[in-house]
């Protein structure tokens, strides 16, 4: 299992605590994982929360992990 963990910057000073962790389980979700990561990021921004998005890739063989990593950049 691969877990991608990139803090998602929201309003507030760097170093503030994480208020919410969003965990997205994924397996062979290359076609939609970028949308899922973006939707989670949009939610954090709209809610004004400092958070992180974690994608738990359970052995995908279709590039899910790479797409998720790039979507979080």
Image (spheres, rainbow, N blue to C red):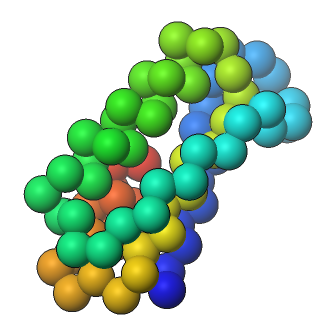
Q: What residue is rendered at 47% in x and 55% in y?
A: 24
Residue 13 place in picture, x, y as percent? 80, 22
Q: On the image, which quarter does residue 69 sit in?
A: bottom left
Q: On the image, which quarter does residue 26 sit in?
A: bottom left
| Left or right placement of residue 19 versus residue 30 in this view | right
Furthest-left residue in this view: 31
Up/down of 73 relative to 60, above or below? above
Q: What residue is rendered at 49% in x and 86% in y?
A: 1
| Left or right placement of residue 16 versus residue 50 in this view | right
Up/down of 45 relative to 30, above or below? above
Residue 12 place in picture, x, y as percent? 76, 17
Up/down of 25 relative to 73, above or below? below
Q: What residue is rendered at 42% in x and 48% in y?
A: 72
Q: What residue is rendered at 65% in x and 13% in y?
A: 48
| Left or right placement of residue 60 versus residue 44 in this view | left
Identify which residue, 65 or 27, lies in the foreground. 27
Residue 14 place in picture, x, y as percent? 79, 31
Residue 34 place in picture, x, y as percent? 26, 48
Identify which residue, 35 or 15, lies in the foreground. 35
Identify which residue, 57 or 13, lies in the foreground. 57
């Amino acid at each position: 299992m691969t877990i991608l963990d990139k803090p998602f910057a929201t309003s507030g000073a760097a170093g503030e605590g994480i208020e919410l962790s969003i965990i997205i389980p994924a397996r062979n979700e290359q076609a939609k994982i970028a949308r899922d990561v973006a939707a989670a990021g949009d939610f954090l921004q709209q809610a004004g929360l400092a958070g992180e998005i974690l994608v738990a890739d359970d052995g995908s063989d279709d590039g899910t992990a790479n797409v998720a990593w790039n979507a979080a950049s």
